[in-house]
Each structure stands twice: as structure tokens, then as C-alpha cells.
Image (cartoon, coloured by chain):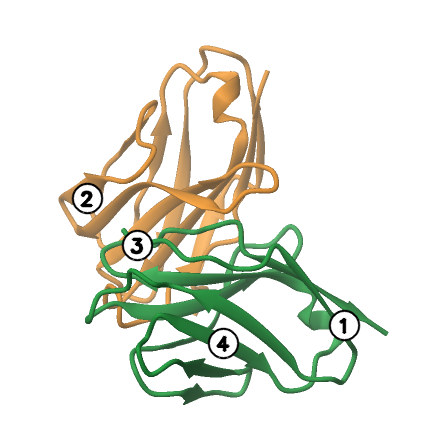
């Protein structure tokens, strides 16, 4: 089991560029999440999904989009990158919301210049 | 989503027990209490979770107050590898992370 994998590990973007952060889990979990973590802060929820084809906004969704076409994959799209999106992005998954642990990926460190 | 309150930082000596407190005074009856930790430059790692009863696993113990408004994560013998930021989460709908407690372990 690879668990939750994320690519790329690091990325530098210029203002206005776009990119997709990839997240894949091999545990057949229905619930998947995207968080961002700014320096010295806790994680904030961007988007989440309760199953293929179903997504919803979290606390800080502006500037991001997601899709969930398969159980395994939950990509996060940044359109028109801004310096405020410089952060570390974590993807996570869980089998059951609330009752089960969340498994986190290693993160993607994004810098927007 | 309900929020939790934790001390900003704590210090412990190696091989001594550590008690990390958390207040979650607005917890609902069906909310679980989760604890995660985050080592430098890594993603959060699950530690333990519970609903009402105290819980034990190979990493730690979780003591939950009878009124469920607070809980304590217990590391029985702190090691240098336990130095991390520990997050207590009142898990109702979605995770709401606070700033956590930064635990330092002194040799």
C-alpha cells in the first residue's frame, strides 16, 4: 500500500500561471480532502469529496477547483496563481468521515513569485 | 465546526510522561476527538481518537473528561522523535485545525 501520494513535491509558479496538484490514494477511500498550510499555522480545508463525482467547498476555496472522476484521484487545480497561494498543500483520505483516521500525503510545497 | 484550545508550547524531558491538554467546550454529542501530530516538513500523522471512553494504542493514550469538554493526550515515555506539533481536533463535519501545541523533548 502506497497510501496517499502527491505530485509534484515542489513547484515554483509565476503570477498568473496555472497548475494541477495531483493526489492519489490506493486504499479505496470514499472521502478525500485538500488542505493548505501557511508557515507556522494549522491546516485549512480547501475542498473535499465524499465520493466520485461529488465535491464541496471547505473553508478557503477561492482560487481553486477540484474534480473527482475516480475513487483514487482527487486533483486540485490552481487557476491564475497569486502570491497568496504560496503554501504547502496536503491531500488526505479516510474511509469513514469522523469515525476513522485521516491519512495524509507528504505534501506539495508551492511558491508563487 | 467546533474549535479547540491548546497551549502553544510544552516541554518535556526524554523518557518522562507527557500530558497534552485540549479544551473542546462546544463539542457535540456525536463529535469524535482526534489527535494528530506533525513532524517538521512532513504531513500530519494520526495518533489516536475517541468518542467517550478512554483509548489506548501503541503510540499514546487518550483520556476524555466525563463531560467531554476536554481531553488529554498522554505519551507515556517521551522520546526525541516525539518532538512535533500536536493537534487536537473536534471532528464533527470536517477537520478544523488550530495552531496546535509544539512539544519539545529535552535529552
User: How far apart, in angstroms, are the residues tagged by discs 4 and 3?
Assistant: 17 Å
Q: Which mark is residue B80?
A: 1
Q: N-terminal of the two: label 4 or label 1?
A: 4
Question: Given the image, what chain letter belongs to the residue carrying mark 3?
Answer: B
Mark 2 vs mark 1: tell me if same chain.
Answer: no
In percent of width and height, residue A4 lies at 42, 58
User: How far apart, in angstroms, are the residues tagged by discs 3 and 2?
Assistant: 31 Å
Mark 3 vs mark 2: tell me if same chain.
Answer: no
Question: Given the image, what chain letter belongs to the residue carrying mark 1?
Answer: B
The image quarter in which residue B12 lies: bottom right
Q: Colour of chain B?
A: green
User: How far apart, in angstroms, are the residues tagged by discs 3 and 1?
Assistant: 32 Å
Dot 4 corresponds to which residue?
A: B72
Q: Which mark is residue A97?
A: none
Dot 2 corresponds to which residue?
A: A69
In percent of width and height, residue B37 lies at 55, 63
Q: Nearer the viewer, mark 3 or mark 1?
A: 3
User: How far apart, in angstroms, are the residues tagged by discs 2 and 4?
Assistant: 40 Å
Dot 3 corresponds to which residue?
A: B2
* Count of numbered circles on the image: 4
Q: Are marks 3 and 1 in contact (CB under 8 Å)?
A: no
Quadrant where the C terminus of chain A sits is top right
SS class, disc 2: loop
In percent of width and height, residue B95 lies at 34, 54
Question: Given the image, what chain letter belongs to the residue carrying mark 4?
Answer: B
At 39% across and 68% down in the image, what residue appears? B34
Chain identifier, colour orange: A
At 33% across and 83% down in the image, what residue appears? B66
Amino acid at each position: 500500500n502506497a497510501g496517499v501520494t502527491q505530485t509534484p513535491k515542489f513547484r515554483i509558479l509565476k503570477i498568473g500561471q496555472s497548475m494541477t496538484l495531483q493526489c492519489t490514494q490506493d486504499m479505496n477511500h470514499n472521502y478525500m480532502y485538500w488542505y493548505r498550510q501557511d508557515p507556522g499555522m494549522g491546516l485549512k480545508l480547501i475542498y473535499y469529496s465524499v465520493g466520485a463525482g461529488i465535491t464541496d467547498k471547505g473553508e478557503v476555496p477561492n482560487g481553486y477547483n477540484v474534480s473527482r472522476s475516480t475513487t483514487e484521484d482527487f486533483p486540485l487545480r490552481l487557476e491564475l496563481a497569486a502570491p497568496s497561494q504560496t503554501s504547502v498543500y496536503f491531500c488526505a483520505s479516510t474511509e469513514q468521515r469522523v469515525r476513522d483516521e485521516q491519512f495524509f500525503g507528504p505534501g506539495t510545497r508551492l511558491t508563487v513569485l | 465546526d467546533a474549535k479547540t484550545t491548546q497551549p502553544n508550547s510544552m516541554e518535556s524531558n526524554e523518557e518522562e510522561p507527557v500530558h497534552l491538554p485540549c479544551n473542546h467546550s462546544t463539542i457535540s454529542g456525536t463529535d469524535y476527538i482526534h489527535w494528530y501530530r506533525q513532524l517538521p516538513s512532513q504531513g500530519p500523522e494520526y495518533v489516536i481518537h475517541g468518542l467517550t471512553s478512554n483509548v489506548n494504542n501503541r503510540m499514546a493514550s487518550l483520556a476524555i473528561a466525563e463531560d467531554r469538554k476536554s481531553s488529554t493526550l498522554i505519551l507515556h515515555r517521551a522520546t526525541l522523535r516525539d518532538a512535533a506539533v500536536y493537534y487536537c481536533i473536534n471532528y464533527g463535519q470536517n477537520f478544523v485545525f488550530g495552531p496546535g501545541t509544539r512539544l519539545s523533548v529535552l535529552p
